[in-house]
Image: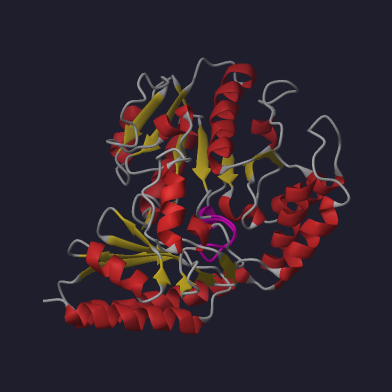
């Protein structure tokens, strides 16, 4: 039995069957490269699903982890911690938010956003408004509330009823449907500027403008889920900055500590009044070690202008992939995305091409059966993107 088969057999006897694993094991990683147990090398175009945004296993982050681990790791949020404050100040400097709540994941950050919106409406605005409107095709997490907020159906929600009350869904891009859904019970509208799990779909600018106008007219809150799109991924620090929008609340996670579990919810000074001591909390959120690492991540992104780099490389990729779309009419339906949050939608089932790319040493994601989703590290070499484009060109040429 091979090393891979031995590992698979051991997992099947020990770990809950919740993942449709790729037929690939990973034993080490560095930069934009990962290796399997047999030593085969792969170009990583997924970066842990937009998590390892500045590359795998960086020496500078490893040094900080080791140093901080010898100083302070976790004491709970009953104490003031300079590492946490330092990170909060750096995050606030990248946006128009004023306050931060630290969590452990994107789902927890989104839970905090939902809770804050409801509590602000009830305790500060003194309105019995609790409903959250989200968009069809959205993804906001796997906890009970964030799963309910997710505007998708089928297996993702099967077997979990009854789901929490207080959520509505409207079609993305349909301002009239949103207008009709808003009532005196509406607390907030929650959107992703680019739907990631939904297929790399940036929201139209005119629709976002309509959303912000409706939010203002109805005196409700705008929550933006930036768990996947934030932290320079789309060519700006935050995807909502492409649209000139200032959310009342927005969330972050994935890339925040470059692989360590961490999330954050950011809010305006006014809306943050909805939380008071005891109204929300977390044991591990914003611990000293993860905060110190995340603080260094922000420094690296700033010093290396990774927002600008993501924009430049993303524009290059879309232009080159667009040429392939012209060369193979009928095979590529669309090329879309912002920065290095990219999707190549095929006009046919992408399973075979996805498998062939993996065999050739490229790690990416297949969404909705037809969309090749790329979320490479913002530090990836341009040549790696060129190699992928060449591989796609050859595979499309082989298609009947």
Q: Which residues are magenta?
A: 230-242
Considering only vertical position in the picture, is 384 above or below 128? below
Residue 195 seen anywhere in this rendered image of the structure: no
Considering only vertical position in the picture, is 21 above or below 381? above
Q: Quadrant of residue 127?
A: top right
Give the residue at the far front of this rendering: 1
Residue 213 located left or right of residue 125? left
Instruction: Where is residue 373? Give x, y as percent.
Output: 37, 62
Residue 231 magenta: yes
**Residue beneath the point at 34% across and 55% down:** 199
Q: What predominant SS class does the magenta segment belong to?
A: loop
Instruction: Where is residue 179? Give x, y as percent.
Output: 34, 33
Instruction: Where is residue 119? Give x, y as percent.
Output: 60, 22
**Residue beneath the point at 40% across and 55% down:** 205
Residue 105 located left or right of residue 348? right
**Quarter occupied by the N terminus:** bottom left
Residue 334 located left or right of residue 235? left
Instruction: Where is residue 55? Give x, y as percent.
Output: 60, 68
Residue 35 magenta: no
Considering only vertical position in the picture, is 236 above or below 198? below
């Amino acid at each position: 039995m091979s090393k891979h088969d031995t590992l698979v057999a051991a997992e099947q006897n020990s770990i809950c069957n919740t993942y449709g694993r790729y037929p690939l094991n990973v034993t080490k990683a560095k930069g934009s490269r990962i290796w399997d147990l047999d030593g085969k090398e792969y170009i990583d175009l997924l970066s842990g699903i937009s998590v390892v945004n500045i590359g795998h296993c960086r020496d500078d982050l490893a040094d900080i982890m080791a140093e901080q681990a010898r100083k302070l790791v976790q004491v709970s949020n009953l104490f003031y911690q300079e590492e946490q404050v330092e990170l909060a100040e750096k995050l606030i400097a990248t946006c128009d938010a004023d306050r931060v709540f630290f969590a452990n994941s994107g789902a927890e950050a989104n839970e905090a956003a939902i809770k804050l919106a409801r509590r602000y409406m009830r305790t500060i605005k003194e309105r019995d408004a609790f409903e959250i409107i989200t968009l069809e095709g959205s993804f906001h997490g796997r906890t009970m509330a964030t799963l309910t907020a997710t505007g998708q159906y089928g297996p993702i929600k099967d077997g979990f009823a009854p789901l929490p009350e207080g959520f509505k869904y409207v079609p993305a891009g349909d301002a009239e449907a949103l207008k009709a859904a808003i009532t005196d019970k509406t607390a907030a509208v929650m959107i992703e500027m680019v739907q990631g799990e939904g297929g790399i779909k940036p929201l139209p600018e005119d629709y976002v403008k309509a959303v912000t106008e409706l939010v203002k007219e109805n005196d409700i809150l705008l929550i933006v889920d930036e768990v996947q799109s934030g932290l320079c991924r789309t060519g700006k620090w935050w995807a909502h900055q492409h649209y000139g929008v200032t959310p009342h609340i927005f969330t972050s996670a994935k890339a925040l500590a470059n692989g360590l579990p961490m999330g954050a919810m950011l809010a305006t000074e006014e809306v943050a009044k909805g939380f008071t001591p005891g109204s929300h909390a977390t044991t591990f959120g914003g611990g000293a070690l993860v905060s110190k690492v995340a603080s260094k991540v922000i420094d690296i992104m700033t010093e290396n202008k990774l927002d600008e780099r993501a924009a430049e490389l993303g524009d290059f990729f879309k232009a080159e992939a667009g040429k392939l779309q012209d060369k193979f009419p009928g095979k590529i339906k669309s090329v879309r995305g912002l920065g290095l949050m990219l999707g190549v939608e095929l006009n046919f089932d992408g399973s075979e091409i996805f498998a062939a790319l993996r065999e050739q040493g490229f790690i990416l994601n297949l969404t909705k059966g037809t969309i090749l989703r790329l979320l490479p590290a913002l530090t990836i070499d341009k040549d790696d993107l060129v190699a992928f484009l060449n591989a796609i060109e050859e595979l499309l040429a082989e298609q009947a």
